[in-house]
Image (cartoon, coloured by chain):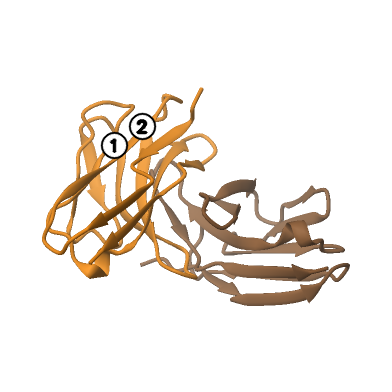
Chain colours: A brown, B orange
Amino acid sequence: TQLLEQSPQFLSIQEGENLTVYCNSSSVFSSLQWYRQEPGEGPVLLVTVVTGGEVKKLKRLTFQFGDARKDSSLHITAAQPGDTGLYLCAGAHTNAGKSTFGDGTTLTVKP
Amino acid sequence: NAGVTQTPKFQVLKTGQSMTLQCAQDMNHEYMSWYRQDPGMGLRLIHYSVGAGITDQGEVPNGYNVSRSTTEDFPLRLLSAAPSQTSVYFCASIASVTDTQYFGPGTRLTVL
């Protein structure tokens, strides 16, 4: 079983603070996705990283894929209450038809 | 373009009952998956399919059956519901080139 471990499991911060969420595995993935899920809804894709060492920025969110393609991080700058939600990472292998998900990080940003 | 649709949205079953959760996608994706999500946790793969007529087991397949007679539809059958199957069930359609998964809105199932 290929496991993806996310840390921290829970994170509660004040508006304006910065934070980093980690996603680690002993397995190599061909790509890694980050999703955000709000209560009562399905996960929605934020970003896909493919190349080892790749860094992608999406407004205040910065995603990095480890050089060995086994780990990834999500950094949020100046968090806002609208960032509140469950953040999930998922590792995939090309044409495998399936992904492995981490258990998620529940982020709460207080105004 | 509806994306991924799931029915029903909510369901309550008694132990031992059977039912089918419906999932359909209109994006012509070959790959589809079923996951369950328990409170405060990530997604666990139940079954997946890489094309019509081809299915395989995921991490937690026991108690569930699937079939894929068409590209669009991927129903999940609970054979004899148990309280341990109380969960939220998500169907996903996967763009094979990018591995991006598009999720349906989920089915919230309670087994009494």
Residue denoted by label 2: B24
Q: Which mark is residue B5?
A: none
Instruction: Give me the chain letter of mark 2.
Output: B
The tally of labels here is: 2
Q: Nearer the viewer, residue A104 or B6?
A: B6
Q: Amino acid at mark 1?
A: Phe
The Cα–Cα distance between marks 2 and 1, rounded to whole angstroms, is 6 Å
Instruction: Relative to A20, say whether B48 is above or below.
Output: above
Q: Amino acid at mark 2?
A: Ala
| Residue occupying the point 56% across, 58% down | A39
Residue denoted by label 1: B74
Percent position (x, y) of residue A14? 82, 74
Left or right, A101 with respect to A52, comes to left
| Residue occupying the point 46% across, 35% down | B96
Instruction: Give me the chain letter of mark 1.
Output: B
User: Split into 4 quadrants, where in the image is the C terminus of chain A?
Assistant: bottom right
Q: Residues within 10 Å of mark 2 (few under 14, many from 20)?
A: many
Instruction: Relative to A92, say whether A81 is above or below.
Output: below
| Circle 2 SS class | strand
Percent position (x, y) of residue B37? 41, 61
| Circle 1 SS class | loop
Q: Locate residue A95: give its quadrant.
A: top left
Q: Are marks 2 and 1 in contact (CB under 8 Å)?
A: yes
Q: Locate residue B82: give its quadrant.
A: bottom left
| Residue occupying the point 38% across, 39% down | B6
User: Split into 4 quadrants, where in the image is the N terminus of chain A?
Assistant: bottom left
| Residue occupying the point 70% across, 69% down | A108
Q: Is residue A8 visible?
A: no
